[in-house]
Amino acid sequence: MKRLFTSESVTEGHPDKLCDYISDSILDAYLEKDENSRVACETVASKGVVFITGEITSKASVNIEKIVRNAIKEIGYDNANTDMDYKTCKIEVNISKQSADIALGVDESLEEKVGQAIISEGAGDQGIMFGFACDETENYMPMPIYLAHKLAERLAYVRKNNIINYLRPDGKVQVTVEYENNEPIRIDTIVVSTQHNENVEQDTLKQDIKEKAINEIVPKKLLDENTKYYL
């Protein structure tokens, strides 16, 4: 029995990833100075503007604007004409302390323990995650998401190391793997969508992405004459 399975990954410059990285950087900065900090920080980014909001309760003093600019710089946004410049972008910070009701609920929940498990019912934005390990790849992830992540990482690598020096930080990858009897046998489709400078020809872009990104990551044995590329 044959089937197709597709997974998607985005590069570090994708707006969602950028915002996550900024929020995580702010959290890390507070925890580094005060391990009991409570940080519920949200980031919104648009062209030339980053908005930081949420609730933070901590004994630490943190320069949030500096952290935000450093995070944007690390990812590679340095051109206001094409997207954003970490040096000149506008940063709005609107942070308040954690509400007394949530603080009370969290404080009380931390006092209730069952064995080694801490019951936390104070904050209500809970989620359920599921997953499993498999032997398709070296890190026990399914082949489609493994290759999608690796290709997204490769796009950042070739950009930052001037291997493909006209790329910009934002991008997205999809990999579709064909399975037979639950075993990955070939790559059916690879999609790469990447931000780039405006003076690049499509043919050059396609050739570079295929030769310097895809062929460096995807095992040749999984590619054949029927593999489809959308670059």
Image (cartoon, rainbow, N blue to C red):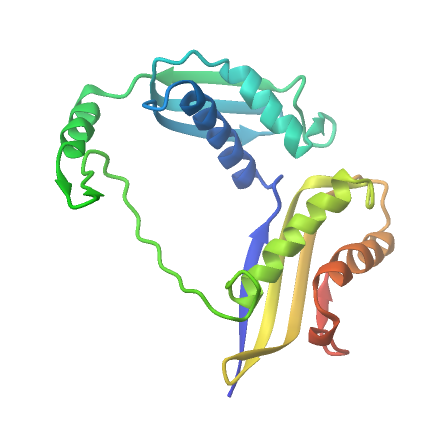
Residue at 59%, 72% (x, y): give it.
177
Which quarter of the picture shows residue 126? top left
**Occupied quadrant, residue 39:** top left
Task: Give me the residue at 12% from left, 36% from top.
Answer: 112
Image spot of residue 166 (x, y percent): 81, 41
Along the viewing direction, whichever of 7 and 157 lies nearer the viewer = 157
Residue visible at 51% across and 85% down in the picture:
181
In front of the other: 180 or 14:
180
Count of numbered marks = 0
215 on left or right of 17: right
Q: Quadrant of residue 138?
A: bottom right
Residue displayed at 71% across by 60% down: 217
Say whether residue 85 is visible: yes
Q: Is residue 19 above or below residue 126?
A: above
Residue 22 in the image: above or below residue 198: above
Question: Could you say where residue 35 lies in the image, as x and y percent from the top left?
Answer: 36, 24
Quadrant into which the C terminus falls: bottom right
Residue 64: percent from the left, percent from the top?
50, 17
Q: Along the horizontal axis of the image, is 141 left or right of 109?
A: right
Q: Residue furthest bottom?
A: 1
Q: Position of residue 173 (x, y in %)?
A: 63, 55
Residue 231: tell me if it is visible: no
- Above or below for 156 versus 227: above
Left or right: where does residue 91 sit relative to residue 32? Answer: right
Front position in the image: 30 or 178: 30
Residue situated in front as seen by the camera: 163 or 188 = 163
Depicted 201 relative to depicted 8: above or below: above
